[in-house]
Image (spheres, grey):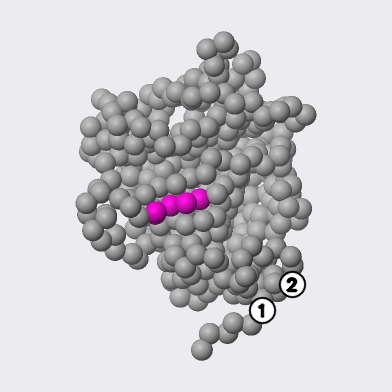
Amino acid sequence: MADDRPVPLDEYPVHQVPLSMKHVASGDRNAYDRCIFHVFDHDGRALLILGLGVYPNVGVIDAYATLRTGDILHAVRASDALGDDRMRLVVGPLRIEVEEPLRRFRLTCDDSISCDLTWTAGFPALWEPHHLQRRGDRLTLEGRRFVQAGGVSGVIRAGGEEFRVDPAGWSGTRDRSWGVRPIPGEDGGRLAQENPAEGFHWIWCPVRFEDRFLMVITQEDADGYRTLNDATLVRPGHRDRQLGWPRSEISYRSGTRHPERAVVHLGDPRKPLELQVEFLASSPLAIGAGYPPADDWQHGTWQGRAWTDRRTYDMTAPHPRAAYGVTDHSARFRLDGRTGHGIFEHGSFGRHDPSGFTGFDSVAP
């Protein structure tokens, strides 16, 4: 028999529907609530990605940390049964503490990756566009997200290396999202069979400058039809500025879809702007971090109670699945005479007519 007594969060006036905070309003098994943090230096020596997710309708909480240094990717992943205290963001050796909502967080891991970091927002959180995807008539993804950038201080250790992290030479970004998002274990049935995926092209790009924050998002179908579009400049004390219809020019490494250079055209015809991208370090989210199409662990999957897994990946070796997932690149950006740092998250797989890719096996010449 299920234990349906009140949980600690029920004491607070935060309810949106007449249910305990133990439950979500949707009965969809793919309901989720999660976050991701990026911590990276400005020279490309290290890229740490740390995240935590809750999947209430399958009873799972999990978390991960990956650290790219040189040609090595270290990874720690943990999963457990979801408990009643939703304000305790701890899974195995990984912990996220909300010290001041929307402002300051403590990120810790005590395992093969060791870190103790204070992540401090430099700008107000910014809503991203409401994200919807369907397969045929089935709603497969509906997410509400906000994004933020700031500074980080503390220490990171792994593989005999130690990095002293300070806001002068390091930056941080984060994304917070919830809603419905596919997790493994569900047969797509007729709608998946009759609506096969042809192609997907994605850019998610938060950039921290000294006095402003820029967010760019685009998602396109195989024929270039755009289903997400946003370019917003945040300046404290000013109204947010919309920068039109972002248009990206990406040069890929020959024989791959790995970006080597990129320019994002922003602004309006009266004052066009160019966001120049210099790539520093790269971390495919399908390697270590549990994003599709990872074959060793994916978010929301039941691994049993108190599961922890550690991996070290040689990034000079071929990882075929990485080509069909999203990769996070730390990068140096230049815009209108200013230099900033952030993440250029990119995935392009299947057909994408504007890029000249004709199918899943198509690569740059």
* Mark 2 Cα-neighbour bin, 10 Å: few <14, some 14–19, many ≥20: few
* Position of residue 287 measured from the top left corner of the image (x, y, whole percent): 41, 51
* Position of residue 254 measured from the top left corner of the image (x, y, whole percent): 30, 27
Helix, strand or loop at label 1? It is loop
Would you say the residues marked 1 and 2 are in contact, meaning their CB atoms lie under 8 Å apart? yes
Whether residue 275 appears in this view of the structure is no
Q: CA distance from mark 1 to mark 2?
A: 9 Å
Whether residue 335 appears in this view of the structure is yes
Q: Main secondary structure of the magenta part?
A: strand
Comparing 289 with 222, the one in front is 222
Q: Check the image and report above or below for 127 versus 21.
A: above
**Apparent side of residue 57 relative to residue 212 in the rendered image (left or right):** left
| Label located before the other in sequence (1 or 2) | 1
Q: Residue at x 53, y 85 (%)?
A: 2
Figure quadrant of the C terminus: top left
> Residue 82 appears in which quarter of the rendering?
bottom right
Asked if the magenta segment contains residue 230, the reply would be: no
> Residue 42 appears in which quarter of the rendering?
top right
Comparing 321 with 112, the one in front is 321
- The residue segment tinted magenta is 139-143
* Position of residue 308 measured from the top left corner of the image (x, y, whole percent): 50, 68
Badge 1 amino acid: Pro
* Position of residue 327 measured from the top left corner of the image (x, y, whole percent): 43, 41
Q: Which residue is label 2 attached to?
A: 11
Q: Residue at x 49, y 29 (%)?
A: 279
Q: Which numbered circle lies on residue 6?
A: 1
Comparing 169 with 268, the one in front is 268
Q: Which numbered circle lies on residue 342?
A: none
Badge 2 amino acid: Glu
Helix, strand or loop at label 2? It is helix
